[in-house]
Amino acid sequence: MSHSPLPDPKRPAARFFPVFGGVSVFFIYQFVQAIIRLAGGSGSMDNKFASLAKDEYMGFLIGQNLMLIPAYLLLAVAGALLVQPLASFWTKRSKFRAAWAVALRALLLTGIIDGYCTLRLVDTRPYFLHDNAFSNSYYGMLDVIPNAIRPQSFFQLFHVLPVLFLIGVGIWHIQRHGKRGWITAGALSLIVLGIFGYQEIGNLRKPTIESAHDAPNIIIIGSDSLRADQLGVGGNHPTRKDGLAAAGVSPVIDRLAEKSTRFENCYTPIASTLESGTSLMTSEYPQSHGLRQMYPNRQTVEKTQKSTIPLADVLKKKGYSTAAIGDWCAGYYHVMPLGFDDISVSSFDSFKIYMSQAVVMAHFEIPLYFDNPLGYKIFPQLGAFAEFVTPEVVTKRVEDRLADPAIHRKPFFWHVFYSCTHLPYRSQEPYCSMFGDPNYRGANQTGVDFDINTFIGGTDLESKWKALPPEEVSQIRSLYDGCTRQFDTCVGRILASLKANGLADNTIVIITADHGDDLYEPGVTLGHGLTFNGGLQANHIPMIVYVPGEPAKVIPESVRLIDVAPTIADLAGADKPKIWQGQSFAGWLHGHSPEAWRPFYGETGFPFIQFTVPGVERPKLPPMDELTKIDPDYNYQFVLKDQYLDRLIQAKQRCLRTQHWKIVCTPTSSGKRHFSLFNLTDDPFGEHELTEQRPEVLAPMQRALERWMDEKKESSIQEIFPAGEPS
């Protein structure tokens, strides 16, 4: 009697190729959906530039999409290997075992795993989940978990569970495929560990190496839009104090400030990153170095490069190595290198990079699975994209540099610059929800409800932002606090790395920013560099200077961002160029010279919004997508159109602040100048205009401001008020 052969227990009920077919259908569908999204609006672009991309750069866009096909293929293979054990378990218990049934099960299982990975973004990268019904549904799924046990539950759900699943899949493949199963399990381990973002156990601790030089290392650590008064040491103490929020918004920076010199009043001459960063490094006002707005053309940039002497060049003559390290907010170093030899930043101002990132972000599966070290190795271009160079990546790059023994051979000067506190205030957990109302579920849950297309294509956001109710303003401020805490964590890691590598006792550390941000104080809404209405929050920045061996102190007298380069030159023993306009405050740090108030002169930046000034009809300017163009001969950079170069400068507000007073000059549509005067001691938010009541203050301040505007000559407070400044 013949017997049918017994089924091989090692043979999977769901063979690989039907499983691969089902998984592939899922990812083909995702690819097609991304193409449809791009065709409908160029991803996140839905403005004049989107039309330009589709009309003139369609070939480039098609090529960018085709370049992502290998990523989808890799996901299909990895997905099939992960899904096969589950599909086999299901198929073995079903009467439908045909290839089509296996493929259908694989399709459904892939969708479930993909949904889980998307849900995991709530914990790991909420900034990829934009505020819409799609993302809110994922947050709703997690609302069943009580707040008290949410951190532990998230850890079990999003970190322990993937590891256990990976172990189970690996064992299944080993049992059924022997040696080939070991290879499969090893490959899966690399892929999944990369996708889920687990870092290597850690580098072996390197022995401390003594430096081969006596000159101090210097590191400036900044975050875009970081306000001085929004640090804990600046007086910001959020109402929520449970859990991680109990430590405040900036515990690390606060502790550093306790052993440093902290300047209570430091101001940037322009609240816009490129121009402010250039002023920081060249010690010149924007009207002197030539970069007056954030979209300069090639001729302007080249002229500025030839006419300025940046701090990095000065320090290199003293034997310093120099580096600029940062994310997309430091991308201006690609436009204006400012003397740095080593530049490790991402970029967003090139239109082709803008289009490439729009394509990648339309393919949601790419950031979902390739925003990790493994993804950067497979697709190196992702490592330079703004969406992928996160604060975590920047901090890791700094830590790796500090751990390199070569760092001890010569002194270094670094500028480490983050995007942590920049609009729209998106951060990862636990920072995103750390200070907000845990029951909030509005449009600003994970970031400001910020429509980039309205921002680019219109100048009417003032009325929209003013209409926000108090609960939305409170949520926005809590998001900003969370972003500040994230930056504080980055600073803590850098300080710890300095100590671990034997560098802390010979490194000057400066905490500062390029500018601040308005956060719905009286007279303002959101943004920076747009107006001098209200207070000076957008120009008021931190200045915490730690010099090893110097006593701690708090200095209320004002300094300016242009004063930083001369100060660093003095601390490093370098000669200061005569063209620098700032004044060193190194003598204040050492206690060798008395502190005295310095005047703050400032100007507004690019007019994304022209805020209303009572009683003034301002010059009309078109929106950003009409003011600018794309220059294919200048690396596809956004540049201001030639016909608006003079008009934009003429429409700028200017400001002068002394110890007690602020005067603002607003150009009018008739070509005249309108001046407003405020007493900041009694009226810090500029709500009461005093030009008629205090003409004896208005006249000398107006003369000083116009002298600076027209002759590029700065008047000291003593020169403005020879008999002493009136209160």
Image: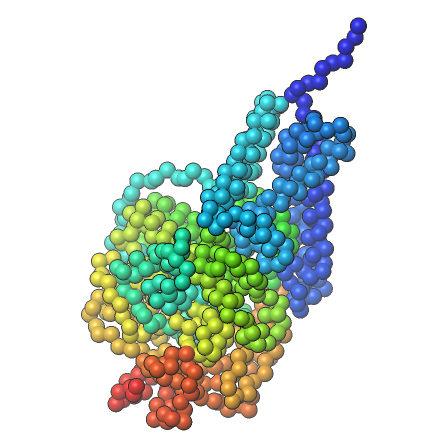
- Tell me the quarter of the picture where residue 297 sits: bottom right
Instruction: Give the camera-side residue of 130 and 554.
Output: 130
Where residue 222 appears, x then y in whole percent? Answer: 40, 61
- Tell me the quarter of the picture where residue 45 sits: bottom right
Where residue 699 appears, x then y in whole percent? Answer: 37, 92
Instruction: Give the camera-side residue of 715 and 475.
Output: 475
In the displayed image of the protein, which residue is found farthest to the top? 1
Instruction: Give the camera-side residue of 289 and 222.
Output: 222
497 on left or right of 58: left
Residue 707, can we see it? Answer: no
The residue located at (37%, 56%) in the rendering is 246
Residue 294, can we see it? Answer: yes
Position of residue 125 relative to residue 598, above or below, is above
The residue located at (34%, 66%) in the rendering is 234
Position of residue 487 relative to residue 229, above or below, is above
In the displayed image of the protein, which residue is found farthest to the left? 592
Query: Can you say which quadrant of the picture contains the C terminus?
Result: bottom left
The residue located at (42%, 86%) in the rendering is 688
Where residue 574 appears, x then y in whole percent? Answer: 29, 64
